[in-house]
Amino acid sequence: METVTLTHTAALARLGHALSDETRTRVLLVLREAPAYPSDLADALGVSRQTMSNHLACLRGCGLVEAVPDGRRTWYRLADPHLAPALGDLLRLVLAVDPTCCATEGCTCT
């Protein structure tokens, strides 16, 4: 059995905190598809740029996304390549626990 450390606990708690907000979760799901600029994320998710900035700061603090300077702009991507498939695995788990979660026609959450 693997030893559970405070580091493991803190890492999972940060992930849980990030996923506890619907907008942050949506940001992670969008970024698993491709990197994006904050203004594009704000437009796509229907939130203000300030709100997006706050959520991206939180996700950076959680270690889940990273900022990549691009001239005068900055774009964001998932901080680790393992995160995209892990989010997909979490979606499949949620669907297994609650199959009605994605009952609408055309749902693409997996």
Image (cartoon, rainbow, N blue to C red):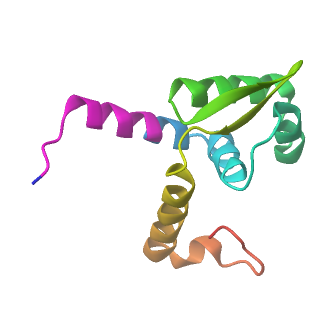
Q: Nearer the viewer, residue 35 or 51?
A: 35
Q: Position of residue 69 (x, y in %)?
A: 77, 23
Q: Is residue 109 visible?
A: yes
Q: Nearer the viewer, residue 54 or 89?
A: 89
Q: Position of residue 59 (x, y in %)?
A: 59, 31
Magenta span has 59? no
The magenta segment is 2-15
Q: Position of residue 81 (x, y in %)?
A: 55, 49
Q: Which image quadrant: the C terminus?
A: bottom right
Q: Please tell me whether residue 53 is drawn above or below residue 78 in the rendered image.
A: above
Magenta span has 5? yes
Q: Which residue is drawn at the image coordinates 48% and 57% (left, top)? A: 86
Q: Main secondary structure of the magenta part?
A: helix
Q: Is residue 22 left or right of residue 6?
A: right
Q: Which image quadrant: the N terminus?
A: bottom left
Q: Is residue 20 visible?
A: no
Query: Would you identify the image quadrant in which residue 93 lies?
Result: bottom left
Query: Would you identify the image quadrant in which residue 9 lies?
Result: top left
Q: Position of residue 102 (x, y in %)?
A: 64, 73
Q: Please tell me whether residue 24 is drawn above or below residue 105 in the rendered image.
A: above
Query: Would you identify the image quadrant in which residue 100 lies?
Result: bottom right
Q: Which residue is drawn at the image coordinates 51% and 30% (left, top)? A: 63
Q: Nearer the viewer, residue 81 or 105?
A: 81
The residue at the far front in this view is 71
